[in-house]
Image (cartoon, rainbow, N blue to C red):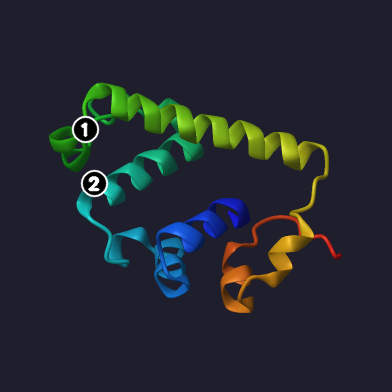
Amino acid sequence: MLAHGSVLVDQFLDPETLRAVVEDERTAGLDATDVAVMELADKVAEDATRLNRSRLRPPAVARSSPTKDILDVVLAAAARCFFSKVLDGVGAEPDAKYQALDPGLRDTLTVGRPIARP
């Protein structure tokens, strides 16, 4: 969350919007496609076995994204889950550079282990 959130704040969103997205992407002012992509990624991360062909094509995604784009979301979510489990498994802490984030945003984005101290 810290790494991805930092990129989003640096390149795409202001801190308040990012906090709103983390709290509930459906009410954060995102377009329907972005919300559908996030919801699909959440479903993959939570329990990919619940997905089937009909659930892989939520209406907002089906209208605007071909099958390849849906596969990209599934692959990205699965890769992030894998990498997060590896980091958790070896006891990695988030880099100390994240201490420099706005405290409110930093707290919102910190999940799991605390940020390493410099």
Q: Amino acid at mark 2?
A: Thr
Furthest residue in direction front, as rendered: 11
Disc 2 designates what residue?
A: 33
64 or 50: which is nearer to us?
Answer: 64
Q: Quadrant of the N terminus?
A: bottom right
- Residue at the disc numbered 1: 65
Q: Is residue 12 above or below residue 38?
A: below
Q: Is residue 59 above or below residue 113?
A: above
Q: Where does residue 66 sit, x and y in percent of width and height?
A: 21, 26
Q: Are the residues flagged by discs 1 and 2 in contact, CB closer than 8 Å?
A: yes
Instruction: Give the x, y percent position of residue 25.
Output: 35, 59
Q: Is residue 6 above or below residue 102?
A: above
Question: Please, is residue 92 above or below residue 62 in the view?
Answer: below
User: Is the C terminus in the top left, top right, bottom left or bottom right quadrant?
Assistant: bottom right
Which circle's residue, 1 or 2, is located before the other in the chain? 2
Which residue is found at the position 64% from the left and 77% from the top? 103
Instruction: Look at the numbered disc 1 and give the secondary structure of its residue.
Output: loop
Question: Which three-letter amino acid code belongs to the residue tagged 1?
Answer: Ser
- Image coordinates for residue 13, horizontal then vertical, percent: 41, 64
Image check: 82 left or right of 53? right
